[in-house]
Amino acid sequence: MPEGDSVYLLAARLRPSLVDRTVVAGEVRSGGRAGASLAGRRIVELDTHGKHLLIRFDDETTLHTHLRMQGSWTVTRPGRVLPSRLHSQVRVRARLDDGFTLWGVDVPVVDLVPTRDEHTLVGHLGPDPLRPDWDAEEARLRLAARPDRTVRAALLDQRPLAGLGNLWVNEVGFLRGVHPATPIGEIDLPKLVDTAARALRFSVTTPGAYQITTGRTRRGETHWVTGRAGRPCLRCGTRVEALDDPPSADGRSRRAWWCPRCQPRLRS
């Protein structure tokens, strides 16, 4: 599943190829507006909120997408096409006036809405540390509203604070020394929110640091706990533990990782 920083960097990568370009041929191929033509629309802006990508057009419409586990975006040069094995997975196609083509491949969430109605799709999201309107105090208040909820569940929920996926939830928990089952009301929320915000920002602004939480680039040592079940903690040497979450409503399951010594479970 993409994290907020991965979608933010995706938008940054796509902007030079898309902004101020006009779609000369293309369409939406899934979602409620499947079959809608994109031809004649000029792309004026790419924006992100958490894990959501918003492509805005000059006719005051917005193409909203969420990649979830499998989706991707790619741009092909003039005269180049996608491999034939991907043709059936194309959900958005937009050939631009310079001959380049934007492809949304296997994107599970696709909406084309009036820009004024974007709030119906992303208005539920909490503050995003990568947006200029980031509000740390609002994020803290939203997290504090349900004090009995575990820190893991609270951070995975995009409504209090947007942009943390499973990787960052695990890593931020380690950095704060918090067991994933700790009730959110029992921890220092200002410090938790600050750590999460700084981690996402560092990931997108520091060359070579994308989603590297340990400062180490050696294979298997880029994360403190994520993916390290049964291996020694890189800080204290204790065996890292892991537990799968119950499947969500859509059948997906995530795994929690933690160091029992660095993130002790509090006993009431």
Image (cartoon, rainbow, N blue to C red):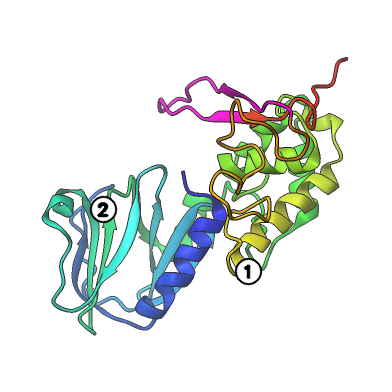
Note whether 70 is above or below 117 in the view shown. above
Magenta region? 238-256
Image quarter of the C terminus: top right
Element class at badge 1? helix
Q: Give whichever of 136, 230 is nearer the camera.
A: 230
Quarter-of-image position of residue 266: top right
At label 2, which amino acid type do we have? Arg
User: Residue farthest to the top?
Assistant: 268
Q: Is residue 10 left or right of residue 182?
A: left
Q: Is residue 144 left or right of residue 62?
A: right
Give x and y (percent) for residue 178.
78, 33
Give x and y (percent) for residue 94.
24, 69
Is residue 243 shown in magenta? yes
At label 1, which amino acid type do we have? Thr
Q: Residues within 10 Å of mark 1 (few under 14, many from 20)?
A: few
Give x and y (percent) for residue 161.
66, 47
Q: Which mark is residue 205?
A: 1
Q: Residues within 10 Å of mark 2 (few under 14, many from 20)?
A: some
Residue at the spot of label 2: 33
Note whether 18 is above or below 192 in the view shown. below
- Cα distance in 3D space between marks 2 and 1: 36 Å
